């Protein structure tokens, strides 16, 4: 293993991030289309993507707003979906925590599924990397991913205005979510969390202000954590 | 139609909130260990909240005024089935979408 330059670390990140573009193109384009269908302008859809930079949370907020849920609930539920960002932040802290604050402040914005997943694996494989290498790699992963996220949102929003209402796009969000959820179900604890959340969301569907989703999500989280603890104790946790 | 003021409020609040969650640990708690119970619960946020959001939409779609709709239910099952078999998000979306439009065509 010869000494790598930060520049080569950046391009390694770029190479690891690039394949994700294939998934992000349809995903962000779809967000743009659905946003346009909901009456958002191209600028509004783009600002949404730039501000939140997280597909699931964006779709969640949009879905609830379209349903006419109260503003506060739309915000709270979207943030609940994005709580995993706090988990990523926690996981990256031992790896990037000693960088200067302003660099960490910039890096924080780019904490997304892809940068987190690639960095955690890569930094473990390269314990000799300096902070400069690590940050270069981290931003390298973000470099191909983020511009595509912005661009395809715009493209979708622009195309969405031309799509006839007869296309019944109302089901685009549920289908997208179901597709995102499936790979998340890695262990029995995840399955249990999802199962309890589903049953609870149907039971509490009648709660005012769409609060059922938050209540059900909370119960699902508790279930997942509980089952995980039980599995660790029983020695069945992978 | 979504009120413009509501929309911008949501964009700013969710954007700011998401940034703060990203910044929380790496920026503020730089070198402190997090309690294990907290991380354990955070692990299941996505996998709990997203299904909770979707389940009522699949069973009682707003588009059909909350009436159970076999076409949408079938499309949801196809998406889940393909997702389970392939673990591929794109393929699942495609399969679900195709199933949905074929179903609409058959019924329509």
Image (cartoon, rainbow, N blue to C red):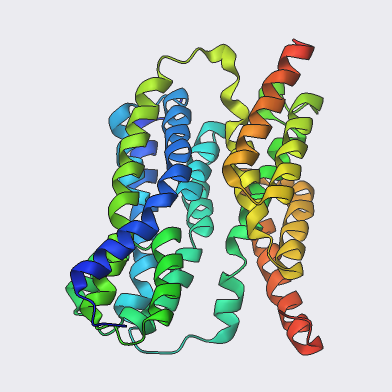
Q: Residue at horizontal 72%, vertical 82%?
A: A229
Determine which quarter of the picture holds residue A2.
bottom left
Q: Is residue A30 left or right of residue B6?
A: right
Determine which quarter of the picture holds residue B16.
bottom left
Q: Position of residue A80 (x, y in %)?
A: 53, 59
Q: Is residue A81 left or right of residue A232?
A: left
In this orientation, does residue A72 appear?
no
Q: Position of residue A158 (x, y in %)?
A: 35, 23
Q: Residue at horizontal 61%, vertical 48%?
A: B88
Q: Nearer the viewer, residue A59 or A218?
A: A59
Q: Considering only vertical position in the picture, is A178 above or below A194?
A: above
Q: Is residue A5 left or right of residue A68?
A: left
Q: Residue at horizontal 42%, vertical 25%?
A: A36
Q: Position of residue A87 (x, y in %)?
A: 48, 71
Q: Nearer the viewer, residue A104 or A221?
A: A104
What is the residue that sits farthest to the front in this orientation? A2
Q: Considering only vertical position in the picture, is A153 above or below A218?
A: above
Q: Is residue A71 left or right of residue A155?
A: right
């Amino acid at each position: 293993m010869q000494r790598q330059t930060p520049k080569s670390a950046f391009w390694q990140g770029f190479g690891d991030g690039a394949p994700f573009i294939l998934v992000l193109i349809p995903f962000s384009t779809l967000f743009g289309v659905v946003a346009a269908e909901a009456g958002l302008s191209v600028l509004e859809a783009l600002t949404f993507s730039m501000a939140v930079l997280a597909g699931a949370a964006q779709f969640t907020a949009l879905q609830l707003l379209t349903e006419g849920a109260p503003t506060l609930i739309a915000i709270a539920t979207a943030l609940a979906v994005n709580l995993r960002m706090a988990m990523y932040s926690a996981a990256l802290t031992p790896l990037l925590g000693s960088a200067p604050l302003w660099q960490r402040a910039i890096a924080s914005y780019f904490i997304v599924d892809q940068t987190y997943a690639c960095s955690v694996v890569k930094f473990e494989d390269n314990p000799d990397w300096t902070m400069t290498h690590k940050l270069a790699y981290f931003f390298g992963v973000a470099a191909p991913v983020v511009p595509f996220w912005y661009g395809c949102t715009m493209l979708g929003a622009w195309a969405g205005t031309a799509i006839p209402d007869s296309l019944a796009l109302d089901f685009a969000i549920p289908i997208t979510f179901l597709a995102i959820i499936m790979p998340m179900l890695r262990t029995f604890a995840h399955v249990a969390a999802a199962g309890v959340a589903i049953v609870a969301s149907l039971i509490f569907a009648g709660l005012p202000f769409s609060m059922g989703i938050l209540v059900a999500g909370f119960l699902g989280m508790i279930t997942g954590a509980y089952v995980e603890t039980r599995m660790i104790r029983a020695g069945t946790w992978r | 139609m979504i009120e413009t003021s509501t929309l911008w409020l949501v964009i700013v609040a969710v954007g700011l909130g998401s940034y703060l969650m990203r910044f929380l640990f790496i920026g503020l708690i730089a070198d402190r260990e997090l309690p294990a119970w907290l991380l354990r619960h955070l692990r299941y946020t996505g996998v709990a909240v997203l299904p909770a959001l979707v389940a009522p939409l699949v069973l009682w779609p707003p588009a059909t005024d909350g009436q159970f709709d076999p076409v949408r239910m079938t499309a949801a099952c196809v998406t889940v089935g393909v997702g389970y078999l392939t673990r591929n998000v794109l393929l699942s979306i495609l399969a679900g979408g195709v199933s949905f439009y074929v179903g609409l065509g058959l019924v329509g």
